[in-house]
Amino acid sequence: MNLKVPDGFPSGSKLEQISFRPDHGLQILVVPITEEPVSQLLAQACDWVAAVGVGNDANKPQTLSLYGAQIVWNSLRATIIAPPEKTAPILLALTDFFLYDAALSEIETEIDDAWPHIKADAAFAFEFSERAVPKRHELSKRFENTVSMRARLARLAPHVHWLSTHPATITSQLNERLRERTRMVSRFEFLSSQLDVLEDVYGMCGQRVSDFMLARQQIILEWAIVFLLAAELLLVVTDLMASVGT
Amino acid sequence: MRQTSIDILRTLAIFSMIQVHFVENLSAEFEGWAGLSGSGAAPVPWWLMTGLGAPLFTFLSGVSYRLWVTAQEVRGRSDIEISKVTIRRGLFLFGLGLIFNVFIWLPEDIFNWDILTFTGSALIILNCIRRLPSSAPLALCVVALVISPALRSIAGYSGYWEHHYFDYEFTLVDVLLGFITVGYFPVFPWIIFPLAGFLASPFIFQMSQTPCRVQAVPVVVGAALIALSAIGHLGSKYLTFLLPLELQTSRLTMFPASTHYVLAMIGCILIALYFCHQAADGSFRFPNNSSVSVCATTFSSHSLSIYLLHHIVHIYPLWFYGLITGNEPTAFWQNAMPSSMSLLLAIVFCVACFFLFRWLDLHGKPTAETAMRWICD
């Protein structure tokens, strides 16, 4: 989707909007250069990128220089200042990288949201009781979320650990540099170990809930039998007492 | 935290109980009703709230117990501690009920199985079932409902109720049968009321762990029970050939508590409590110092004391007057005055009670409830 290019950028520039998910997208400004001085454009690009994400360190603009191309980005905006023949592969590499980075960020956010519940839920991994029965749907939902996150992380693994192709191309080089700058591999490892904890807790919770519910069904049946036997015994005893009384 | 809706309904149960007891014990025979079972020569007047107090009171005891247990669990009180307090309270009420029978109804009626001994037993039973899945108390309710008429039939209920009151021999068999099925408030079927209250409590008061998604479930269940009661009533009236004579209870009787009486009362109470909770605890929340709240709280929080006191106040003068005039102590029982006079006395007693218990509260004086807490908690 092409948008209106901000003022001050040379003609031929174009602004694109890429949506990774409904609530998250990226604006990429492509500025093809031939002879112009880069420093002026770089300052302008930094200002434009910094205009979003105010007050958030993670959204401070970062710059990368590669084979005469300048790339300025944060998590919401990016600017490519490069000779016209290089803009297309750089745009492709950037889109590719941000797609996986957004997926990784999404898992990070979900894990951050899930973390506060783990302390309360850990108790259910050890023991599940009648009072906790109404919480089982919540626990089941969290287990499903954990499995979903693990699956998405597993699908990201090949892209995070992707080795550079030979001979090196601008796309592969840029991808590698961006992964280094955003510490993608480390983040992936952290997420993986955090998910291990969540999986352990909710896996055990699932096991406890399942065991408890099965036992509960049996207990209900046993109690129904006990009540019926007690009722029969009561009738017999009453009959006996009534006959003794007579 | 006190629930105004429970206080209001419990106050209604107390008013009903005071009115019925005063009128029954002072005027039933005088007016020719021959007991409030309604089988006398003259019909029981419409304004007498017969058959309402005890079911409402016992149902609310189940509701309150569930709320109390939840509050104790939130405070971190252990299961064992909750059980100990419950059992101590149950035994206290049971013992108090027996002592009360001796002093009010004279020693020969010690085992007439009145509401206090029943409430004590019900508390102990509730403690036993409180940790079970909800289906277990529900199953117990169904079993109790089904076997109660059969138990009455086997025990020969009518043999114990020839003069419209429970008349038993002082034998182990009669005492046990009275407790199980033929007394005033036997375990079967009266245990259904506290159990139903215990089961309904989370649905009505929307406790956090309630699995209920439809808020009006109590109303639907209540209406269904009333409908079932009506069907049962018609069935036992027109399909008499299906049932033996002892099991045919087409009337809504409290003594014995017929099956459709139990169903209809639970249905009505469920609906009443639901709407009362919606109004008094929800949209029209009364301030703590409002006259309705003060009145309801005063009566509700002293229900045990009022129960004991109202008997002393209207029964003891009868016994003493009987003795003074050279008759049997029970000579004027149900035969002392016209019903209008006894109703007036009941109203005067209620008003006096309010001021008495307000005064006791303000000055921190002991009551039966404080004694129970001091001994049991």
Image: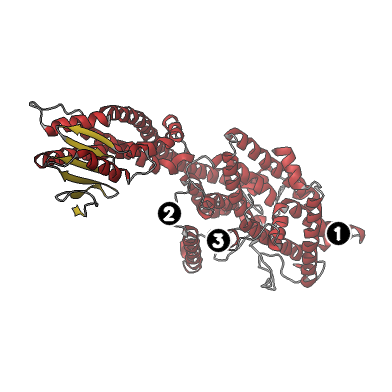
Left or right, A4 with respect to B282, comes to: left
Q: Which residue is drawn at 69% across and 62% down?
A: B292
Q: Nearer the viewer, residue A84 or B70?
A: A84
The kind of residue on which mark 1 rests is Pro
Residue on which disc 3 sits: B278
Give the percent coordinates (x, y) of residue B357.
78, 55
In the figure, B138 relative to B81: above or below?
below
Tell me the residue that label 1 is attached to.
Answer: B317
Judging depth in this view, the residue of B308 and A142 nearest the camera is A142
In percent of width and height, residue B233 lies at 51, 66
Chain that bears disc 2: B
Same subunit: marks 3 and 1: yes
In this rendered view, identify the residue nearer to me: B299 or A8: A8
Between disc 3 and disc 1, the foreground one is: 3
For the residues labelled 2 and 3, the Cα–Cα distance comes to 16 Å
Whether tag 2 and tag 3 are in contact, CB under 8 A, the answer is: no
- The dot on residue B213 is 2
Q: Disc 1: which chain?
A: B
